[in-house]
Image: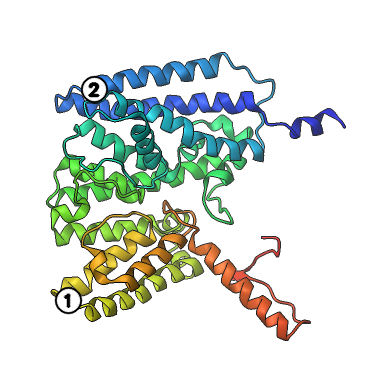
Amino acid sequence: MDRSKQRRMYINMPMLLRVMGWLLYIEAVFMLIPLITCLIYDEPDYMSFAIAIVITVVAGILMTTLIQPERTEMGKREGFLLTAQVWVVFSFFGMIPFLLCNGSISVSDAFFEAMSGFTTTGASTMPQIEHLSKGILLWRCLMQWIGGMGIILFTLAVVPMLNSSGGMQMFNAEVTGITHEKLRPRISQTAKRLWGMYIFLTAMLAVLLWLGPMDTFESICHAFSTISTGGLSTANGSIASFNSLYVDVVITVFMFLGGVNFVLLIQALSGKPQAIVKNDVFKVYVGIILVMSVLFVIAILCRGQYTGWKSITIDPVFQIVSVLTSTGYTAVNQESWGPFVLSLIIVMMYFGACAGSTSGGAKIDRMIFLWKNIRNEIYRCVHPNSVMSVRINDKRMSSEL
């Protein structure tokens, strides 16, 4: 076996660890935001973030200076391993502020909270959060925002050298979905466009929420956790605590956008709105919301939960979009709508929204692929000599895919 083949059989761990060191620098930079927030509001938890930043930077220095890889290329194995590893490493350093803050959080709870944040899961071990400092509350939402679009994708945007050392493998491992569509020839350019759209939507949402009943801090936190479809809030009662029709509508719209493939959003803003209209996945996404809305309204009426026009319009649509995009916000008591609605919620939670978005779940794309392939196989049982293919957006998909 020649040396080149032998190298491809092994994981380039030194290069992988060095990239992880660069990622830790980025995490430390993000920690400066809640640190500054603590200083603005005169909160003692600024020391928690200061210590966490020092520890994270030192770890990054050790990994980038002491480790000198013989080769810099990265393949699929390194890309997949880095994507899986980054959640654990980031959560390990991201939990440090929770351990040192005044909230007396245990190691297991702190790690759970950090992992839930970076993976945009949105689950929490904290029954009461309003007693936490604003720096800690912001860090919870900021972790979700970082993980929403993907920290590796951010690294590809700011570290151009990775384009020639495994950038495509890292991009494919990070971006969700069966197929991946590039906006530009170079991965770094595509990553910049995606993060640019992400930041633009976040800023727009923060301004709109600020124009409503939320103050500046609350609007920024909820903008982070809405666009990332993470769902962590600054209030114990989530969105229901604000009791505002305006907030419900604005949050619903941006949760919906967070569930759309960001490539489609960029194309639409670039003067190609037909890209969204003609997209099969987007049409199914909208169709699911419409069908579920009808079913939810029927269930609400049958259960005698009608309390006004909002209870059969905004409330069900809000919860459907929140569940389908895996955001997890709550504006009403959905348990009162009965077991039929809850069963529909479980199904929607499994599939999620569109691939290439910030939502969780298996993605609607896979559901479409699965349905069309099953339909073809059933047809072949009756017509065994027929030649059929799965077509998405008027493109033939390979049988291997």
Q: What residue type is labelled 1?
A: Tyr
Question: Can residue 218 be seen?
Answer: yes
Q: Looking at this rendering, what residue extends furthest in the right direction?
A: 1
335 lies left or right of 199: left
Identify the element where label 2 is drawn.
helix
Could you say which is closer to the camera, residue 75 or residue 132? 132
Residue at point 30%, 74% (across, down): 296
Residue matched to label 2: 46
Could you say which is closer to the camera, residue 362 or residue 72? 362
Residue at point 36%, 42% (across, down): 144
Q: Which of marks 2 and 1 is nearer the N terminus?
A: 2
Question: Can residue 167 be seen?
Answer: no
Residue at point 14%, 24% (across, down): 42
Splitting the image into 4 quarters, where does residue 266 fall? Answer: bottom left
Q: Looking at this rendering, what residue extends furthest in the bottom direction?
A: 382
User: Could you tell me how far apart the alpha carbons at marks 2 and 1 are, in whole angstroms?
Assistant: 47 Å
Q: What residue type is labelled 2?
A: Tyr
Split into 4 quadrants, where in the image is the N terminus? top right
Residue at point 25%, 57% (across, down): 330
> Where in the figure is residue 257, as x and y percent of width and height?
36, 58
Q: How crowded is mark 1: few (under 14 residues within 10 Å), some or many (20 or more)?
A: some
Label number found at residue 241: none
Splitting the image into 4 quarters, where does residue 240 fall? Answer: bottom left
> Where in the figure is residue 47, as x and y percent of width and height?
25, 19
Residue matched to label 1: 306
41 lies left or right of 173: left
> Where in the figure is residue 105, as x and y percent of width and height?
28, 30
Up-down relation of residue 311 to residue 35 (above or below)? below
Identify the element where label 1 is drawn.
loop
196 lies left or right of 77: left
**Do tag 2 and tag 1 residues touch (Cβ < 8 Å)?**
no
Question: In front: mark 2 or mark 1?
Answer: 1
